[in-house]
Image: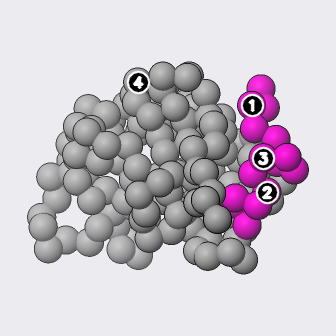
Amino acid sequence: MAHLLWDDQVAWLLDPTDGGCLPDAFVENTTAADWQAVLDLVEEQGWASEYAEGEAVLPLPRAEAVLSRPADGECPSLRVWPDPEVCAIFRFLGDEQIDFDVDLRELQGQEQLDVLCGFLTAIGRRLGKSVPLFPEGGGTQPLLGFDVAADRVRVMWTPPDK
């Protein structure tokens, strides 16, 4: 299963002391149906999850209901644990993009990297879209991600020429 090796390929790339700790994943050109597909995937996989609007923890609604909330309402979030040690936090900012972040401090080793790769792969395959992971706060070049054309997670970042 391991296409990426922690020690050889990504330990340096996912170092939480080198920049931000919460890299952002973005799936672009999505719809409410794509959001619902992700919510269905969470339930089908049996991943632990917690949906909240502000401080209120609520049952997970349908994607259409979440995405049609008032513009001045709390931004809902969904915490998903594909493993007890790894959490992804989804934010329902709009239907045109699915975005979430992960905590690099939870991704320190091969076992956690494999969890992340499995998670990105499951989402990418369900949606038929790439799932790139960018440095915290954005950036133009992803660190790594599920590449739909290659059907696997791969390192996407290349160091600048010196």
Q: Residues within 10 Å of mark 4 (few under 14, many from 20)?
A: some
Quarter holding residue 100: bottom left
**Numbered label attached to residue 11:** 2
Residue under label 4: 128
Q: Main secondary structure of the magenta part?
A: loop
Quarter holding residue 21: bottom right
Marks 4 and 1 close (CB-CB < 8 Å)? no
Q: Nearer the viewer, residue 87 or 162?
A: 162
- Left or right, 24 with respect to 157, comes to left
Alpha carbons under labels 4 and 1: distance apart:
19 Å
Label 1 SS: loop
Magenta span contains residue 103: no
- Residue drawn at x 36%, y 74% is 54
**Residue at far front of view:** 162
The boundaries of the magenta stretch are 1-15
Magenta span contains residue 8: yes
**Quick check: can you spot residue 87?**
no
Marks 1 and 3 close (CB-CB < 8 Å)? no
N-terminal of the pair, mark 4 or mark 1, is: 1
Q: Which amino acid lies under the numbered mark 2 shown in the image of this protein?
A: Ala
**Numbered label attached to residue 3:** 1
Alpha carbons under labels 4 and 2: distance apart:
28 Å
Q: Which amino acid lies under the numbered mark 1 shown in the image of this protein?
A: His
Residue 25 x %, y % = 47, 52
- Residue drawn at x 52%, y 31% is 147
Label 4 SS: loop
Q: Residues within 10 Å of mark 3 (few under 14, many from 20)?
A: few
Q: Residues within 10 Å of mark 2 (few under 14, many from 20)?
A: some
Marks 4 and 3 close (CB-CB < 8 Å)? no
Alpha carbons under labels 3 and 2: distance apart:
6 Å
- Residue drawn at x 69%, y 58% is 13
**Numbered label attached to residue 9:** 3
